[in-house]
Image: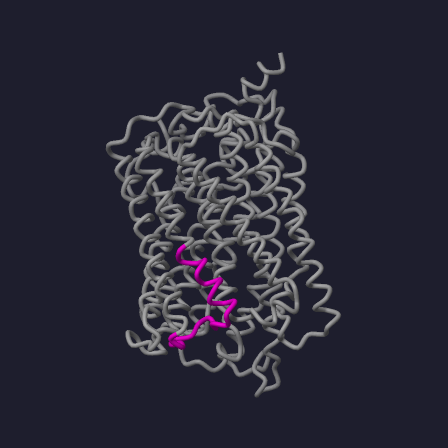
C-alpha cells in the first residue's frame, strides 16, 4: 500500500513517523499561510489604490503590511521548500527508507504548529505594527503584541534547526550504495547547504528575539536607547541571521530549478560540479554580507565598502547557476510542460531580482533607493519571483509522485501565464516608483504616484486569479485527475524509481546507484 492509504484515520496522521506524511502536512500548512499572507497583501494593495489612504486608518495599514510580511517570511517562505518538499523528497532521492530521526522530524512539525499558534494569537488578539523585521525602536515602544509575535518566531526557529540537523545527518549517513557526493541530485546539494545555514544562523535570530522579549518584559536595556541600549545593535544581530535566511529561502528554489530544467530539457545539466559548489559558496559568503542592509545606519565608510564588495562577490556563484541553466537549455529537447514554464519564468524573474540587487549593493545608489519601493520590488522579485515560482514549479513537477494523479496541463499553462503577467505588473511598476523616490510602507502618498500604484494593484488581482486557478485545478486533479505513471517526465533520479505514490518505506528493496541522476538514455545513445 502507498503512504496515503497505509494507515487510515486522523490519528494515524497526527502520530505518523513517515517523512512523506509529515512533508504533506507541512505542505498543507505552508500553503494555508501563503493564502492568509496573500489576503493581507491584497488588502494593502486595495488601500493604495488612491493617494489619500481612505480605506483603512494608518494604524490598521501598518498592521496589515506587518502581518503580511511576518506570515509570509516566518510561516511560509522559510519552511516552504525544505520542510514540505524537502521532507518528502530527500529520502526518496537518496534511496533511504526515511529521514535519520523520524521522531525528531515529527517533533519539528509540532514545534512549527506551536509557533504558528503564537502568530494566530497575535493576529486575533493584539496584532503587530512593527514591520516583519521587528526593528527597534518601533518594537520597543509599540503597544501591539510584539512579545507573542517574537516568541512565535523564536519557537519556529527551533523547528528550523531540528529540520536542518535531520537533513544533514540523513544526507551524510543514509545514501544508497553507489550514491556518492558526485552523484547527488542538485536539489539535495541545495537542501544540504540550506540545512547548514539553518543550523548555524537561526540561533542568532533566536537569541536576538529573546533579548527583545526580555527588554520589553523586564526593562533591561539591550536595544532601547532610553534605557542604555543600542537600536543599531538589533539590526546587526537581525541581519546576521536574516541575510543568510534569504538563502534559506532561495537555495532550495535553485535546487528545484536545476531538476526541472535538466529533466524537461532531456539534457544532462551543464556544469554539475560548478552548480553544486556554488550552493556551498553561497551558504558561506551569505554569512558575510549583512551590513549591506545598513549603509545608512551610520556604520563606517570602510565597513560599508567591504560589505559592498562582498555583495558583488555573492552574485558570482548565483550567476554561475543562471549561466549553467541557460547552457543546459541550449540544444536541449525542451518540453514546454507546466514545470518547464515555471522554470523559464524563474530564470527571467530571478535574473531581474539579482541584477537589481547589484544596484542596491552599490553604496551611492543604495543611499538614494534605501527604504523606497525599489527595495520592495527587488525583495519580491527574489523571494516570490524566485522562491515561490520555483516552489510552484516543483509542486507541479512532483505532483504525480506526491499524489499519483496528473493535473490538466492546459489549465496549468494558463495559470502560469496569469501568475507571470500579474507578478510583473504588480512589482515592475514598483521599481519605477522607487527610482522616483516613493517611500515604502506609506499609508498615503502624493498623487503623481497614483498610476503606478493602480497598475500594481491591478497586477496583484491578476496574480491572485492565477494562484486561485492553480489551486482549483490541482485540487480537482486529486479526485478526477488521470492516474499518473511512475515516471511521467522521464527523470533518472531515484524518486522516479519508487512507486507512485510511494509505498510506506519508499522502496521494496534497497536501490543501488550505478550512474548519475542526469544520465538520460538519449545522451548515452548520442555518445554511441
What residue lies at 50% left-to-right and 25% top-to-bottom?
A: 333
Where is residue 189 shown, x and y percent of the image? 60, 39
Foreground pick, 42 / 25: 42
Q: Is residue 35 above or below residue 43?
A: above
Q: In which quadrant is the N terminus drawn?
A: top left
152 sits left or right of 222 in the view: left
| Magenta-highlighted residues | 425-447
Residue 432 on the magenta segment: yes
2 sits left or right of 316 in the view: left
What residue lies at 40% left-to-right and 76% top-to-bottom?
A: 445
Where is residue 14 shown, x and y percent of the image? 35, 45
Q: Residue 183's quadrant in the figure?
A: top right
Foreground pick, 90 / 48: 48
Where is residue 64 shown, x and y percent of the image? 36, 69
Where is residue 9 shown, x and y percent of the image? 28, 39
Residue 3 on the magenta segment: no
Q: Residue furthest left?
A: 480
Foreground pick, 479 / 489: 489
What residue lies at 44% left-to-right and 39% top-to-bottom?
A: 394
Q: Residue furthest right?
A: 302
Q: Residue furthest bottom?
A: 226
Q: In which quadrant is the C terminus drawn?
A: top right
Q: Residue furthest top?
A: 528
Amino acid at each position: 500500500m502507498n503512504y496515503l492509504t497505509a494507515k487510515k484515520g486522523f490519528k494515524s496522521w497526527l502520530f505518523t513517523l513517515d517523512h512523506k506524511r509529515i512533508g504533506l502536512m507541512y505542505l498543507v500548512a505552508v500553503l494555508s499561510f501563503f493564502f492568509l499572507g496573500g489576503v493581507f497583501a491584497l488588502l494593502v494593495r486595495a488601500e493604495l489604490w488612491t493617494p489619500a489612504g481612505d480605506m483603512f486608518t494608518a494604524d490598521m495599514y501598518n498592521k496589515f503590511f506587518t502581518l503580511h510580511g511576518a506570515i509570509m517570511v516566518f510561516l511560509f517562505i522559510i519552511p516552504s521548500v525544505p520542510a514540505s518538499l524537502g521532507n518528502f523528497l530527500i529520502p526518496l532521492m537518496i534511496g533511504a527508507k526515511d529521514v535519520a530521526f523520524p521522531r525528531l522530524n515529527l517533533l519539528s512539525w509540532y514545534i512549527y504548529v506551536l509557533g504558528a499558534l503564537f502568530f494566530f494569537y497575535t493576529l486575533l488578539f493584539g496584532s503587530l505594527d512593527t514591520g516583519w523585521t521587528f526593528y527597534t525602536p518601533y518594537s520597543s515602544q509599540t503597544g501591539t503584541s510584539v512579545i507573542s509575535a517574537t516568541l512565535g518566531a523564536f519557537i519556529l526557529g527551533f523547528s528550523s534547526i531540528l529540520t536542518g540537523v535531520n537533513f544533514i545527518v540523513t544526507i551524510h549517513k543514509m545514501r544508497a550504495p553507489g550514491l556518492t557526493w558526485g552523484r547527488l541530485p542538485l536539489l539535495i546539494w541545495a537542501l544540504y547547504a540550506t540545512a547548514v545555514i539553518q543550523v548555524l544562523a537561526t540561533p542568532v535570530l533566536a537569541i536576538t528575539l529573546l533579548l527583545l522579549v526580555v527588554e520589553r518584559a523586564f526593562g533591561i536595556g539591550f536595544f532601547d536607547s532610553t534605557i542604555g541600549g543600542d537600536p543599531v545593535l538589533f539590526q546587526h544581530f537581525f541581519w546576521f541571521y536574516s541575510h543568510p535566511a534569504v538563502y534559506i529561502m532561495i537555495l532550495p528554489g535553485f535546487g528545484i530549478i536545476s531538476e526541472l530544467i535538466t529533466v524537461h530539457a532531456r539534457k544532462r545539466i551543464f556544469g554539475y560540479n560548478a552548480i553544486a559548489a556554488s550552493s556551498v559558496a553561497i551558504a558561506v559568503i551569505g554569512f558575510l554580507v549583512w551590513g549591506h542592509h545598513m549603509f545608512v545606519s551610520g556604520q563606517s565608510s570602510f565597513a560599508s565598502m567591504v560589505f559592498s564588495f562582498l555583495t558583488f562577490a555573492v552574485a558570482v556563484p548565483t550567476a554561475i547557476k543562471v549561466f549553467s541553466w541557460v547552457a543546459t537549455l541550449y540544444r536541449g529537447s525542451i518540453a514546454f510542460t507546466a514545470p518547464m514554464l515555471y522554470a523559464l519564468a524563474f530564470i527571467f524573474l530571478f535574473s531581474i531580482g539579482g541584477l537589481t540587487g547589484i544596484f542596491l549593493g552599490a553604496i551611492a545608489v543604495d543611499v538614494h533607493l534605501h527604504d523606497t519601493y525599489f527595495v520592495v520590488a527587488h525583495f519580491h522579485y527574489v523571494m516570490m519571483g524566485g522562491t515561490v515560482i520555483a516552489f510552484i514549479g516543483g509542486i507541479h513537477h512532483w505532483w504525480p509522485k506526491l499524489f499519483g494523479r496528473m493535473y490538466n496541463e492546459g489549465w496549468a499553462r494558463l495559470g502560469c501565464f496569469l501568475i507571470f503577467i500579474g507578478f510583473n505588473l504588480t512589482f515592475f511598476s514598483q521599481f519605477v516608483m522607487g527610482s522616483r523616490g516613493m517611500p515604502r510602507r506609506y499609508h498615503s502618498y502624493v498623487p503623481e504616484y497614483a498610476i503606478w500604484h493602480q497598475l500594481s494593484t491591478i497586477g496583484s488581482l491578476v496574480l491572485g486569479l492565477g494562484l486561485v486557478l492553480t489551486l482549483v485545478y490541482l485540487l480537482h486533479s486529486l479526485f478526477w485527475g488521470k492516474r499518473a505513471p511512475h515516471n511521467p517526465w522521464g527523470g533518472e533520479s531515484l524518486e522516479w524509481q519508487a512507486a507512485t505514490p510511494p509505498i510506506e518505506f519508499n522502496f521494496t528493496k534497497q536501490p543501488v546507484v550505478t550512474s548519475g541522476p542526469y544520465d538520460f538514455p538519449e545522451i548515452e545513445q548520442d555518445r554511441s
